[in-house]
Structures are given as structure tokens and as C-alpha cells.
Image (spheres, rainbow, N blue to C red):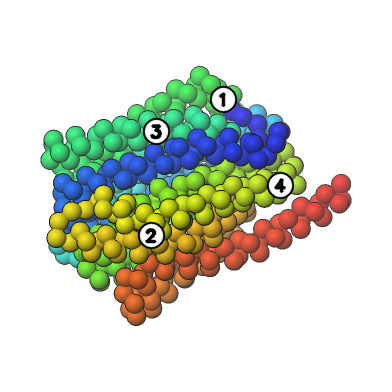
Amino acid sequence: MAKNLTEGEPSSLIWNFTLPLIAGNIFQQLYAFVDTLIVGRWLGVHALAAVGCTGCLMFLLVGFVLGTTNGLALIMGQRFGAGDEKGVRRSAATCLVSSLIFAAVLTTISLLFIPAVLFLMETPPEIYADAKTFIMVIAAATPVSVFFGLLVNVIRVLGDSRTATIMLALSLGLNIAFEPLFILWLKWGVAGAALATPCGQIFSVLACLLHIRKKLSFIIPHGEDWKITARDLYEHLRLGLPMGFQMTIVALGTIVLQIALNRLGPVPVASYAAATKVESIAIMPMISFGLAMAAFAAQNYGAGKLERINQGVREAVKMSGGFSILVGILLYTCGGFFMEIFVEGESAAQVVEYGRIFLTVNGCSYFILSLLFILRNTLQGLGQTVVPTIAGVMELIMRSVAAFWLCDIYGYIGACWASPMAWLGSLLPLSIAYYYTCRTFVRQRELL
């Protein structure tokens, strides 16, 4: 059921909204954990490196999809907060049409340019074939990812994070079930690892549609709701595409860094791939608080409750900041143990040590990351796109500096400092923008 986030204690609402997101996002990363475990242990270090070196490209595709569909859904959240049911239905129709066009264009571009991008990334010859196979399967399944992302984001922005999490868990549960089937029984190798993802998502798309029909029927467009104008498309794409591009800019930074890692050889690539899987689980609470603030800000902005948004940000910083410190301590003390789960063989000791260094450096910087997620998602929920995009550009610049300067001087350790540098560079414009946004809220309140 949809939930109104414009009434009630902000801290309680944000906490209750975030808890299912944390569970769902951790489960999502547990799938990635299982995927890396199967690939690393049963297909070998070279296969792990092949999948790992496409991680930045996968982030590019999936990030663009999730960013865009989240932006489209936020318009619906603003209208829901304002109590505009007709506007909600019209927004739903616009989201569907926009997603159809978006999916077709993105799939075509991805399939055409991925081989050239892998070549430009200087992918090591011994892993090129598997890397190409893996990412091409992911790219071909982009339409499934688009509609799954849209439906889950729509359910979430209407205040129902629990159902959104269940749908995500269904997809990932099926994903985990298909993984050993495709890899171990059918012997499809890295192609099987890639194919498991869209297969799981297809069933979840059907489940989302059934849930919307039964529980959220008020958002289903009918009659004149389908008479979409150019203004409708512009309003949604004005927020959706910039959010997608923000994720793309961040992903470009990881691609630049991956190029530098590829030059260091398969062992650093495998170490980085495995360590980022561990980190993906570690940062889930921070990502979840950010997603909660996007929905909270969108609904309250639509309702005109501006001071309530600032109150929510303060509470989210306390909760997410506390998580970030605890997780950082955990990775500092147990990072080596987590890495040992992924690999075995003659290169395992070096892979584990490299991964431990990465987790230590990044874990000490998680408080910065927690602030970044909260401020960026809040600004996006308010419909702001320029500053979050500038923040993404700052991330790209800082990662590029790490790739072309620190990696050349310090090797793998230089690459480990890329993320903390990027987070700090991105947080600066976001903090300035939010400060001035708060001042605007104060002036508007004084005029009332």
C-alpha cells in the first residue's frame, strides 16, 4: 500500500522506510557476492577478472537505468504528496512511454559500442572474450532492467519500501537459483552468470504489475491520462535523464580507473573486483538512507512542507553517519577475512592482501559517503538536477586524477584512494547547494 510521508515524526518515518531498503539492498549485494564466489571458485581467477573488469560498464548501464527510472518516478512522488491523483495517473502513463523509448535507444547504443569500449579500456587479451560475452548479455537485456527499475521505483516513491524490497528479493532469489543452474549444470560459463539477472527480473516485473493492479490501482492510467503532451515528457525527462547521466558520469570515472587497473595485470583486477563486492554490501545502509530521503523529500516538496525536509535530513545524517562509522571499523578489522572467501590457489594471498588494503582505505572514508548519499538524493527529490550533475563531474575528475597520477606513482594503492577522493570532491558542491536551498526554505517561510 502507498504511504504518506508528509505526516508523522520524520525520524520514525525515515527509519521505518529505510529498514526494508537495507534488507533488500544487502540481499541484492549478497547475490553479487554469490556470483563472485561461484565465478572465482569454479571458473577461476581469469573468469573473475573478466567479470570484474566489466563491472564499471555494468555500473554504467545499470546506473543509467536506475538513475533515469528513479527520476521519472520522483515526479509521481511529488504529485502523490500534493494529493493530485489525476496528476499521478498522467505521470504513470508518461513514465511508461518514456521508458519504452529510453530502453530501445539505450539497448541499441550499448550493443553497438561495447566491443569498442572494451578495446579502448585495454582489457587484457586473456580475459577479453569472456568480458565481452558477459557484458553483451547484460546489454541485450536492458529493456527488462528498465521496466523492472521503473516499477520498483514507482512502488518505493509512493512510500511502500517493504513491497519494493520484496519484489527485489524475488528477483534476486531467482537470480541466485538460476546462477548455479546456468554455470554449473548447463556449463554456460560467464554467459550463464550474466543471463541469470534478466531471467530473475522478468518474473519480478510480472509480480510488480500484479501488485499494482491489486493494491495501487489508483495510479493505473485510463482514458485521457494517455494523452501525453510534450510538456509531460519534458517535465519527466528533465529530472529522469539528468539523474541517469549523473550515474553515467560516476561510472565513467570507474571506467577510467579500470583502464589503469588493467595495466597492472589480472591479480590487481581480480583483487579490486572482489573487494568492491564486499564494499557493495558494506555501503548498503548508506545508499538506503539516501533512497529514503529521495522519497521523503519528493513527497514533502509536493506538499509544500519545506522545513520538514530539513528536519528529515538532520535525522538521516545522525542515523546514516552512525552506520558508516560502525561499518568502517568492521572492514578495518575483518577486511582480510572477507577477501579470503572469494579466492583460492597460488595467487590467493596477493589477492587477499590487495583487497584488504582497498577495504581499509575506503572504510575510513564512509562518513563522507553517507553525507554524499543523503544530500544528493534530497536535492534530487526536490527536483534539482544541475548541482548533482556537477557533483558527478567532480567525482569523474577526482577518479581520473587517481587513475592517471596516483596509479602511475603508487600502483594499486593509488587506485585505492580514488573513491575517497571522488567522494570528497562530490560532497563539496552538494553541501554548498543544500546550504543555499535551506536558506531559500527560510525565506519562503518568512514570506508566508
Camera-near label (2 vs 3) is 2
**What is the C-alpha distance between the residues marked 1 and 3?**
18 Å
Q: What's the amino acid at mark 2?
A: Leu
Going from the N terminus, do you reach mark 2 or mark 3 first?
Answer: 3
Identify the element where label 2 is drawn.
helix
**What is the C-alpha distance between the residues marked 2 and 3?**
26 Å
Residue 411, percent from left and from top: 31, 74
Between 255 and 240, the one lying in front of the other is 255
Q: Which residue is mark 2?
A: 359
Q: Residues within 10 Å of mark 3 (few under 14, many from 20)?
A: many
Q: Which residue is mark 3?
A: 169
Going from the N terminus, do you reach mark 2 or mark 4 first?
Answer: 4
Q: Are marks 2 and 3 in contact (CB under 8 Å)?
A: no
Q: What's the amino acid at mark 4?
A: Gln
Residue 447 appears anywhere in the view: yes
Q: Residues within 10 Å of mark 4 (few under 14, many from 20)?
A: few
Q: Which residue is mark 1?
A: 1
**Left or right of 31: which side holds 74?**
right
**Left or right of 202: which side holds 294?**
right
Q: Eyeballing the image, is 37 above or below 12? A: below
Identify the element where label 1 is drawn.
loop
Q: What's the amino acid at mark 3?
A: Ala
Q: Which residue is mark 4?
A: 311
Q: Quadrant of the N terminus?
A: top right
| Outermost residue to the right | 447
Going from the N terminus, do you reach mark 3 or mark 4 first?
Answer: 3
Going from the N terminus, do you reach mark 1 or mark 4 first?
Answer: 1
Q: Which residue is pictured at 29% across the width and 64% down the height?
A: 354
